Image (spheres, rainbow, N blue to C red):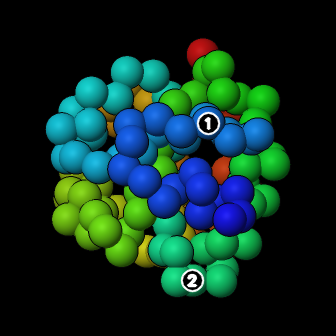
Amino acid sequence: MGILSGVFGSKSEKKETPGINWIQLTTEDQLENLSKTSVLFKHSTRCGISSSVIKRFERQHVDLNDTVDFYYLDLLNFRNISSAIAEKFQVIHQSPQAVVVKNKELVAHGSHYDILELDLNAFTE
């Protein structure tokens, strides 16, 4: 079993990897309880680009585990939450996509390889 399939294969609330400590995004209520800078990573397990981006994203941002909450959304199982994100933060749904929220407001977003250009350090406290 690969690292990512082991991490994202279940619906538990929080999983740890050698990189980012992902929080599974499984309910719309979680969107109301974002308490610090949060990244909502929308991932399609069937997309090669999405798999490539998430691996590189993890390597880039492992040092922010203490200052950023990283949420992982499995688009194939929770499309309704993706729609809620699009509505709440006024972003067009894309996959893969990273939505950065601070103080419950959208501060940045990117899709596909543009995700790797997001400077998350600019949004930490």
Helix, strand or loop status at disc 1: loop
Q: Up-down: is 63 above or below 8?
A: above
Across and down, in percent, residue 120 comes to 66, 38
Is 68 in front, or is 104? Answer: 68
Can you tell which quarter of the image residue 121 is in? top right
Q: Residue at x 76, y 40 (%)?
A: 18
Tell me the residue that label 1 is attached to: 16
Is 76 in front, or is 102? Answer: 76
Across and down, in percent, residue 57 comes to 72, 54
Nearer to us of marks 1 and 2 is 1
Tell me the residue that label 2 is attached to: 47
- Does any portion of residue 119 appear in the rendered image? no
Across and down, in percent, residue 83 comes to 23, 65
> In the drawing, what numbered circle is on residue 116?
none
Which residue ends up furthest to the front in the rendered image?
Answer: 1
Q: Residue at x 73, y 72 (%)?
A: 52
How busy is the neighbourhood of tag 1: few (under 14 within 10 Å), some, or many (20 plus)? few
Q: Up-down: is 17 above or below 90?
A: above
- Amino acid type at image mark 1: Glu
Q: Up-down: is 10 above or below 44?
A: above
Q: Residue at x 31, y 68 (%)?
A: 77
Across and down, in percent, residue 25 comes to 36, 47
Q: Earlier in the sequence, mark 1 or mark 2?
A: 1
Q: Residue at x 27, y 27 (%)?
A: 33
